[in-house]
Image: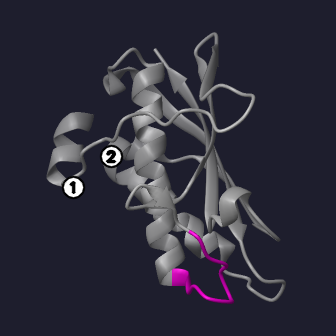
Amino acid sequence: MSVYEKLKALNIDLPAVASPAAAYVMYVQTGNTVFISGHIAKKDGKPWVGQLGKNMGTDEGKQAARAVAVDLIATLQAACGGDLNRVKRIVKVMSLVNSTADFTEQHLVTNGASELFGEVFGEQGRHARSAFGVAQIPLGACVEIELIAEVA
Protein backbone atom coordinates (compact mmCIF):
# COMPACT_ATOMS: atom_id res chain seq x y z
CA MET A 1 0.00 0.00 0.00
CA SER A 2 1.44 3.40 -0.95
CA VAL A 3 1.85 6.27 1.48
CA TYR A 4 -1.12 8.00 -0.16
CA GLU A 5 -3.31 4.91 0.14
CA LYS A 6 -2.42 4.71 3.83
CA LEU A 7 -3.28 8.39 4.34
CA LYS A 8 -6.62 7.84 2.61
CA ALA A 9 -7.33 4.74 4.71
CA LEU A 10 -6.63 6.83 7.83
CA ASN A 11 -8.98 9.59 6.54
CA ILE A 12 -6.13 12.09 6.56
CA ASP A 13 -6.18 15.03 4.15
CA LEU A 14 -2.89 16.87 4.26
CA PRO A 15 -3.29 20.58 4.98
CA ALA A 16 -1.59 23.43 3.16
CA VAL A 17 1.98 23.92 4.33
CA ALA A 18 2.25 26.45 7.14
CA SER A 19 4.25 29.64 6.72
CA PRO A 20 7.13 30.45 9.04
CA ALA A 21 6.10 32.48 12.09
CA ALA A 22 9.52 34.15 12.47
CA ALA A 23 12.95 34.39 10.79
CA TYR A 24 13.38 30.82 9.51
CA VAL A 25 12.25 28.50 6.72
CA MET A 26 9.95 25.49 7.07
CA TYR A 27 12.58 23.00 5.89
CA VAL A 28 16.14 22.72 4.65
CA GLN A 29 17.54 19.91 2.55
CA THR A 30 21.21 19.01 2.44
CA GLY A 31 22.05 15.97 0.39
CA ASN A 32 19.36 13.37 1.01
CA THR A 33 18.51 14.70 4.46
CA VAL A 34 15.57 17.02 5.12
CA PHE A 35 15.36 19.01 8.36
CA ILE A 36 11.84 20.20 9.10
CA SER A 37 11.40 23.12 11.47
CA GLY A 38 9.32 22.70 14.60
CA HIS A 39 5.57 22.71 14.04
CA ILE A 40 3.20 23.57 16.88
CA ALA A 41 -0.04 21.76 17.58
CA LYS A 42 -3.10 23.35 16.02
CA LYS A 43 -6.77 22.73 16.56
CA ASP A 44 -9.29 24.23 14.14
CA GLY A 45 -6.46 26.18 12.52
CA LYS A 46 -5.39 27.92 15.73
CA PRO A 47 -2.64 27.09 18.24
CA TRP A 48 -3.73 24.19 20.45
CA VAL A 49 -3.08 25.96 23.73
CA GLY A 50 -2.54 24.11 26.98
CA GLN A 51 -0.10 22.74 29.50
CA LEU A 52 0.16 19.03 30.22
CA GLY A 53 -0.30 18.33 33.91
CA LYS A 54 -2.23 21.57 34.41
CA ASN A 55 -5.19 21.79 32.05
CA MET A 56 -4.51 18.91 29.63
CA GLY A 57 -4.13 15.19 30.10
CA THR A 58 -1.87 12.71 28.34
CA ASP A 59 -4.56 11.47 25.94
CA GLU A 60 -5.38 14.97 24.69
CA GLY A 61 -1.67 15.72 24.38
CA LYS A 62 -1.26 12.56 22.32
CA GLN A 63 -4.03 13.76 19.97
CA ALA A 64 -2.24 17.11 19.67
CA ALA A 65 1.05 15.38 18.81
CA ARG A 66 -0.74 13.34 16.14
CA ALA A 67 -2.13 16.58 14.68
CA VAL A 68 1.41 17.99 14.56
CA ALA A 69 2.57 14.85 12.72
CA VAL A 70 -0.07 15.44 10.02
CA ASP A 71 1.27 18.98 9.52
CA LEU A 72 4.86 17.67 9.44
CA ILE A 73 3.92 15.13 6.76
CA ALA A 74 2.43 17.97 4.68
CA THR A 75 5.69 19.92 4.95
CA LEU A 76 7.69 16.78 4.18
CA GLN A 77 5.59 16.33 1.04
CA ALA A 78 6.51 19.87 -0.04
CA ALA A 79 10.18 19.11 0.64
CA CYS A 80 9.87 16.02 -1.57
CA GLY A 81 8.53 18.02 -4.50
CA GLY A 82 5.02 16.76 -3.85
CA ASP A 83 5.87 13.04 -3.72
CA LEU A 84 5.91 11.37 -0.30
CA ASN A 85 6.95 8.12 -1.97
CA ARG A 86 10.45 9.66 -2.08
CA VAL A 87 10.69 9.31 1.73
CA LYS A 88 13.24 6.62 2.52
CA ARG A 89 13.17 6.98 6.30
CA ILE A 90 11.89 9.10 9.15
CA VAL A 91 15.22 9.45 10.92
CA LYS A 92 14.63 11.52 14.06
CA VAL A 93 11.77 13.21 15.89
CA MET A 94 12.25 15.80 18.62
CA SER A 95 9.20 16.68 20.68
CA LEU A 96 8.74 19.56 23.10
CA VAL A 97 5.79 19.18 25.45
CA ASN A 98 4.53 22.24 27.33
CA SER A 99 4.21 20.69 30.78
CA THR A 100 4.30 21.29 34.49
CA ALA A 101 7.42 20.40 36.47
CA ASP A 102 5.80 17.24 37.85
CA PHE A 103 4.37 15.92 34.54
CA THR A 104 6.44 12.92 33.41
CA GLU A 105 4.56 11.46 30.42
CA GLN A 106 6.11 13.51 27.61
CA HIS A 107 7.14 10.24 25.95
CA LEU A 108 3.53 9.03 25.90
CA VAL A 109 2.31 12.35 24.46
CA THR A 110 4.93 12.10 21.71
CA ASN A 111 3.70 8.60 20.83
CA GLY A 112 0.80 10.35 19.09
CA ALA A 113 3.23 11.50 16.40
CA SER A 114 5.50 8.44 16.41
CA GLU A 115 2.61 6.03 15.99
CA LEU A 116 1.23 8.00 13.03
CA PHE A 117 4.61 7.99 11.29
CA GLY A 118 4.64 4.20 11.70
CA GLU A 119 1.10 3.86 10.35
CA VAL A 120 1.83 6.01 7.30
CA PHE A 121 5.42 5.01 6.43
CA GLY A 122 5.56 1.48 7.87
CA GLU A 123 9.03 0.26 8.82
CA GLN A 124 10.53 3.42 7.25
CA GLY A 125 8.54 5.43 9.81
CA ARG A 126 10.39 3.95 12.79
CA HIS A 127 12.76 6.60 14.10
CA ALA A 128 15.08 7.78 16.83
CA ARG A 129 13.41 10.24 19.18
CA SER A 130 13.70 12.71 22.01
CA ALA A 131 10.80 14.01 24.10
CA PHE A 132 11.28 16.92 26.48
CA GLY A 133 9.10 18.74 28.96
CA VAL A 134 9.44 22.50 28.64
CA ALA A 135 8.05 25.46 30.58
CA GLN A 136 6.47 27.11 27.52
CA ILE A 137 6.14 26.86 23.74
CA PRO A 138 5.46 29.76 21.33
CA LEU A 139 1.87 31.01 21.37
CA GLY A 140 1.13 28.80 24.38
CA ALA A 141 0.89 25.66 22.25
CA CYS A 142 0.86 22.34 24.08
CA VAL A 143 3.28 20.49 21.76
CA GLU A 144 5.96 21.36 19.19
CA ILE A 145 7.70 18.72 17.10
CA GLU A 146 10.53 18.84 14.58
CA LEU A 147 11.56 16.11 12.15
CA ILE A 148 14.57 14.82 10.23
CA ALA A 149 13.95 12.56 7.23
CA GLU A 150 15.97 10.85 4.51
CA VAL A 151 14.64 11.20 0.98
CA ALA A 152 15.54 9.73 -2.41
State if disc 1 and disc 2 touch (CB < 8 Å): yes
Q: Is residue 5 left or right of residue 56?
A: left
Pointer 1 residue:
10
Task: Give me the C-alpha separation between circle 2 and circle 1.
Answer: 9 Å
Depth check: give the residue in front, 113 or 39.
39
Numbered marks: total: 2
Pointer 2 residue:
120
Depth check: give the residue in front, 8 or 64.
64
The magenta-colored residue range is 49-58
Question: Residue at left 18%, top 54%?
Answer: 11
Question: Residue at left 69%, top 67%?
Answer: 97
Q: Position of residue 116 (x, y in %)?
A: 40, 55
Q: Quadrant of residue 73?
A: top left
Image depth: mark 2 or mark 1 in front: 1
- Give the residue type at disc 2: Val
Question: Residue at left 39%, top 27%?
Answer: 77
